Amino acid sequence: MNLEESYQEVKPAIVAFVPKFHPVFDPQQPSPEFPPIFGTGIIVADGIVATNDHVVRAIGRLPKPPNYPKDLWPVTCILLYLIANKGVAAIKIDVLGVFSIEKAEMGTSYYGPPKPDIAFVRINMKDLPCAQVEYDPRKIKEGREVATAGFPMGTDTLTAPGYLHQITPTLQKGIISAILPFECDNPHALMINVMTQGGASGSPVFLPESGKVIGVLYGGLEDIQKTVNLKSKDKIQNDPSTHSHLYKIPTNVSYVVPSHYIVDLLAKISKDENFKITESTPSLKKKIEEGNFANRKTGKGLEYERWDASIKEKIDRKIKQIIPQEESSAPPLDQRAG
């Protein structure tokens, strides 16, 4: 199996996390062409998505209408699913709960973070495509080729020319640059030479020859640069524009949570009644069968629902849903868009 073939095994299980609501100050403001992606995930078991802990914690900071039920999550999981002879459907899946590590006992000889940046999301759908997760220390060697796919820079990549022109994850490849802290059976992280940016957190890292997921991206090393200090006699000394400023730029040094954490935690999650699939859980097949399909015109946004409830705040604003369709539909997006 080569990368072209293995990616086809992993790609259907990649999902994006987007806010369910989008605050707008002007009711006439057009809806975004695609919801703002703030994280990536990979389906590792039916109804269970692996992602980063910091992605899950970002859900608590998402905008939501006043009096929004506390037991409901203001986030939606979107699966970009290719349907033969129709195109790509943006399938909306509700989030039912999360599983994260509050505290971890790592022993005395440990060089990693207080706890691994890994978490799981329970989504309301079954019979989903799942990636194969495996961690074999014999196959995790420095210099080994790896690949990763997700949504670096979030929706900005999908709408790079100013309109929606990409409706698929972005694939990258590199090598394992280092095993942290050193080669061992249970490293706390892997370093790979792939540039990662916001939105790619939670992206699966897999072996090109098998498609086996060996971890998920959780961060990248940033370099600090300095702007040029303008020295002009015509400028006033206390003018901020004449001063140098520091800024960060991404590098090709990225970090991966090894999948041995995923394997161990999945064993515990499988015993949790809250994460079990029920008979009432809708299936992917049924979702597609009941979906309403429509051709999307190039460069034009999707229709979004508006939330028109009154808001008692100092700022007069409305909340607009940014999910493509109702719960029972999965509208396809034209692959040739853009």
Image (spheres, rainbow, N blue to C red):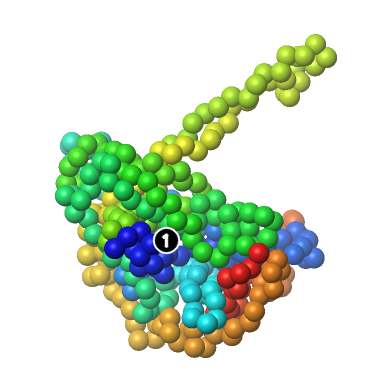
Quick one: SS at disc 1?
A: strand
* Residue 79 can be seen, yes or no: yes
The x and y percentages for residue 63 are 60, 59
Given residues 106 and 10, the one toward you in this image is 10
Name of the residue lying farthest toward the top: 233
Residue kind at label 1, given as amino acid type: Gly
Given residues 120 and 313, the one toward you in this image is 120
Given residues 318 and 293, the one toward you in this image is 293
Left or right: 242 as drawn, with respect to 89: right
User: Compared with residue 249, is residue 281 higher up or lower down, i.e. above or below?
Assistant: below
Residue shown at 16%/49% (left/top)?
138
The x and y percentages for residue 213 are 30, 58
Residue shown at 45%/43% (left/top)?
195
Which residue in the protein does label 1 denote?
A: 41
Residue shown at 22%/55% (left/top)?
135
The x and y percentages for residue 42 are 39, 63
The x and y percentages for residue 71 are 47, 70
Residue shown at 75%/17% (left/top)?
238
* Residue 323 can be seen, yes or no: no
Left or right: 217 as drawn, with respect to 263: right
| Viewport quadrant of the C terminus | bottom right
User: Compared with residue 301, is residue 316 higher up or lower down, i.e. above or below?
Assistant: above
| Viewport quadrant of the N terminus | bottom left
